[in-house]
Image (cartoon, rainbow, N blue to C red):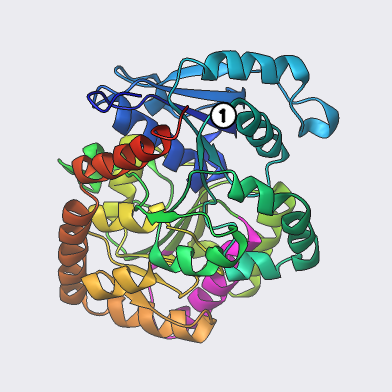
Amino acid sequence: MTHDRKPSVLHYLDQLDPRTGGVVAHVSDLAVLCAERGVRVCIATSHEHPRPERLDQKPGPDIVPLGPPGLGGILLSGSQLDRLFELASGFDVMHLHGAWNVANLQIASRARRLGKPYVTTPHGMLDDWCMQHRGWKKKGYMALFGKKYYAGAELVLYCAEGELQQSSPWTAGTPGRVIPAATDLAPYQDLPGPDRARQSIAGAQGDEPVVLFLSRIDPKKGLEVLIDAAGLLADHASGFRLLIAGTGEPEYVAGLRKRADRAGIGDRTHFIGHVSGEDKVSLYQRANVLALPTKQENFGLVLTESLAAETPVVTTKGVDIWPELESCGGGRIVEGTPEAFADTIGELLEAPDICEEMGRRGREWVMQDLDPDVLAEKFLDAYSLAASHNP
């Protein structure tokens, strides 16, 4: 690759369903971020639909469906790999995502044989909490396959310094760079206000204080802690509502509904499903505080999105960017217990002036430190370095 042009990038991601969480959002925003700056970008995927509407904007990345994986729904067929690498021949560098996708091993193996440079992003999957959860399987996988996978990468790209520190024991000494997750800030430049959410989202009507959870509904996210915290808070605070935005396994969601009933807050807890677009921005603004009692979070896009909408956040040290959230003044970092969340949320609901100041400071940090132009240059510099190793 010559150094007088921007490197072209081919991403592989197994699916693009926006309901599955932060990885899809990160890749989508990154691909659009680069495409908007004149970079040729493509996402090859096994499952094309559903996908974020953002990927259909112009300029934007090309989307190339490879078809569902074969054996066990995890391996690409020989013809799919052939198609992928025929496509890859027209790109300077490949970007692979996640730590446990077996198809990535196939792609990386062929890339090494062909001398096609690739970079990879673990998306927090090598963090301490993740490696301890079903740890024997993951450590065995890393010993058998992961070491060679990371050793063959030109760079490992991390979203936070905390992620780099936790992941580096598993990445075979491959150089790493910390670049915050690309965030689409365009919807947050001119905020729509909370009235749209009041009119269109169940539970958001009126002016009662709102505690918001917005994420994939998964045991890792700690919703049990938040529901129990809301139950404690209801004992000495009246009128607030708990809004839970996101989707998850129906049986798990049903269990959470029952938990809210047992905590005595069933009537003030609203499960509102997946929210996107301007409705999501307005919902952030409608909330007094966003609470995420997560056990582990790589970057936590919902946290930076909430701050961009001037809504303060309460979360745990399970988030790799917790030092940044705390130091910017927009976040409170607490222990992952119902008591700690109840105390902190209660304090903020009783002090709207503090919430307003936290939201203002948080938005300033996001708009400055996560500026898309700055992040785009950092990613393109990393891609250029990787592509320079292309024989």
Q: Which residue is drawn at 52% across and 79% down?
A: 336
Residue ID for mark 1? 115
On screen, residue 222 versus residue 137, left or right, reads left
Q: Which of 90 and 203 is in front in this view?
A: 90
Q: Is residue 315 above or below residue 29?
A: below
Question: Start and end of the magenta stretch?
Answer: 218-241
| Location of residue 84 by image quarter | top right
Q: Is residue 326 above or below residue 100?
A: below
| Location of residue 2 by image quarter | top left
What secondary structure prevails in the magenta region? helix
Q: In the rendered structure, does residue 260 fall within the stretch colored magenta?
A: no
Label 1 residue SS: loop
Query: Looking at the picture, which amino acid does disc 1 mark?
Result: Gly
Q: In this view, does 46 lie above or below 153?
A: above
| Location of residue 107 by image quarter | top right
Residue 335: percent from left, percent from top: 48, 83
